[in-house]
């Protein structure tokens, strides 16, 4: 590594921290929202199911870049408030992540067979008990691998926040590139840092999957 | 000299079940008194399993009424959970919870639904494993058990709730032939104990040995309702005769 670039190590480090923070935040919010939308997908009320489908399909289809612009400029204009790049990026990432997570939640629930529902109901369980003791413990196994995938894709999407001026890892690197004039090396460092982060997440995911696996 | 007969545990009157325009159960009347073992036979698709699912409110009904211990069974009411706790259900495909051990399967509902202390429930569960002759398999997971073993765990799971009625939905149809006997033996023990049982099955031998009543259903209706030995040796209805003939030939 050339000394000019190495001198900015703390900028890269801060970029990594911010990227981890915003993507984690978006995954938490997106997970919570996706959970609600996923439950709406299996609701007995047609209107709720319909609403959930529209939500999922819309935010799954719109490219993240368009969402970033939409949130930063569109939302700020429509709601007459001055959204910070951080707020706009978090909302945009959350919208995409929640749409993806709602599908993960729905698939997880649907992976639990109808017979399990019948057995649980037959023993007198209520809807909430059925989910707590029978459905979620089985669904989580199915939901874990794609959830890790959603996190990784959210983390990668967060690089687009650089477009609206949010200084995360990619933007940090681009600033270093501007300052030092060294292009290839800086981009390589960014790429390697993303790889290390995402590969670690992947490893953690595999370890979690092993923990949740039950005897077969 | 005759004593008053015990009031029925289950009282079904004029039951109608439809899926859209398709009528599955077409006016069924059935009373079951305590200690009675009622065996329901009939061709597939004649509403036998649906009838059981209506009794514990897994299906809503379109006509008639079901009273369980004098309480109406209404699939969407708040009372349905309390009724289901008193009815044990055993399924053709066992439906054990794959993420729990056999023992945990048996303990789950008494502890979480009835709120009984885990210690007491475990003691009772151990006794039930002895009853179904699986005391050595209590810590196995469903995937490690044979079909016959899974079904006996499912029976123990139903018994753990101290149900007032046991319903069996073709309990041996998904089993390998060599494990059918183990399950039937357990069911015979239960019948001998005086349990009230409603059994949908094709096991005519079981019906003959332990059944008090045999019901033949066809086209969503009860066609014949008599003591098993009588029905098997001398079926009155042409459809019954034809059905039993085809089963007994094999």
Image: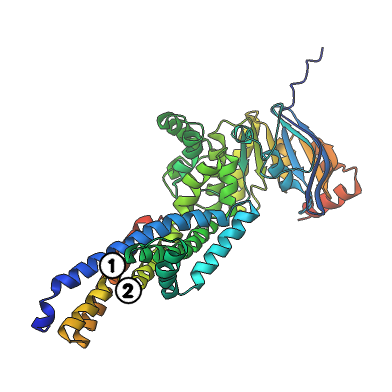
Q: Are marks 1 and 2 in contact (CB under 8 Å)?
A: yes
Residue B248, how many percent across, how many down? 78, 51
Residue at the image point whose x is 51% and y is 57% from the top: A37
Kindly indicate the quadrant of the structure image that contains residue A6: bottom left
Q: Tell me the quarter of the picture where residue B237 sits.
A: top right
Pick the front one: B62 or A190: A190
**Neighbour class for label 1 at 10 Å: few (<14), some, many (≥20)?**
many
Percent coordinates x, y for residue A131 in the rendering: 50, 47
Q: Which label belongs to residue A159?
A: 2
Q: Which residue is under mark 1?
A: A19
- Chain of the residue under the numbered disc 1 shown in the image: A
Q: Nearer the viewer, residue A27 or B82?
A: A27
The earlier-in-sequence mark between 1 and 2 is 1
Label 1 and label 2: CA atoms lie apart by 8 Å
Residue A216 in view:
no
Q: Residue furthest left?
A: A3
Marked residue chain, label 2 = A
Residue B212 image offset from top left, x and y in percent:
75, 33
């Amino acid at each position: 590594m050339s000394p000019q670039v190495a001198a900015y190590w703390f900028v890269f480090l801060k970029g990594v921290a911010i990227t981890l923070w915003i993507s984690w935040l978006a995954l938490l919010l997106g997970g919570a929202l996706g959970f609600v939308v996923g439950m709406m997908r299996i609701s007995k009320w047609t209107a709720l199911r319909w609403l959930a489908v529209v939500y999922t399909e819309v935010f799954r289809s719109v490219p993240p870049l368009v969402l970033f612009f939409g949130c930063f400029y569109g939302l700020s204009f429509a709601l007459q408030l001055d959204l910070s790049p951080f707020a706009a990026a978090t909302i945009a990432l959350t919208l995409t992540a929640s749409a993806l997570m709602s599908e993960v939640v729905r698939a997880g629930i649907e992976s639990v067979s109808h017979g399990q529902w019948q057995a649980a109901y037959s023993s007198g369980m209520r809807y909430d008990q059925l989910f707590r003791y029978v459905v979620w413990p089985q669904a989580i196994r199915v939901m874990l691998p794609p959830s890790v995938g959603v996190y990784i894709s959210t983390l990668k999407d967060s690089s687009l926040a650089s477009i609206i001026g949010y200084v995360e890892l990619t933007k940090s690197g681009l600033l270093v590139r501007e300052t030092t004039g060294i292009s290839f090396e800086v981009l390589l460092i960014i790429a390697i840092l993303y790889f290390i982060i995402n590969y670690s997440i992947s490893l953690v995911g595999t370890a979690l999957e092993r923990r949740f696996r039950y005897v077969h | 000299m005759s004593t008053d007969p015990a009031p029925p545990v289950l009282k079904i009157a004029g039951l109608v079940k439809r899926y859209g325009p398709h009528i599955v159960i077409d006016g069924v009347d059935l009373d079951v008194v305590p200690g009675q073992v009622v065996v329901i036979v009939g061709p597939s698709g004649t509403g036998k399993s649906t009838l059981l699912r209506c009794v514990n409110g897994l299906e809503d009904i379109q006509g008639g009424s079901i009273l369980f211990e004098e309480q109406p069974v209404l699939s969407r009411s708040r009372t349905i959970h309390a009724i289901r706790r008193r009815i044990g259900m055993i399924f053709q495909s066992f439906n054990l919870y794959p993420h729990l051990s056999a023992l945990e399967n048996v303990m789950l509902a008494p502890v979480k639904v009835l709120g009984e202390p885990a210690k007491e429930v475990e003691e009772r569960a151990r006794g039930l494993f002895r009853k179904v002759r699986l005391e050595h398999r209590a810590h196995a997971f469903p995937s490690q058990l044979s079909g016959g073993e899974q079904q006996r765990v499912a029976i123990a799971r139903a018994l753990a709730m101290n149900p007032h009625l046991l319903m069996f939905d073709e309990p041996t149809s998904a089993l390998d032939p060599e494990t059918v006997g183990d399950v039937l033996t357990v069911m015979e023990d239960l019948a001998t104990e005086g349990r009230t049982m409603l059994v949908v099955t094709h096991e005519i031998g079981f019906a003959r040995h332990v059944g008090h009543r045999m019901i033949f259903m066809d086209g969503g209706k009860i066609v014949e309702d008599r003591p098993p030995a009588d029905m098997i040796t001398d079926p009155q209805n042409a459809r019954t005769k034809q059905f039993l003939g085809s089963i007994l030939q094999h």
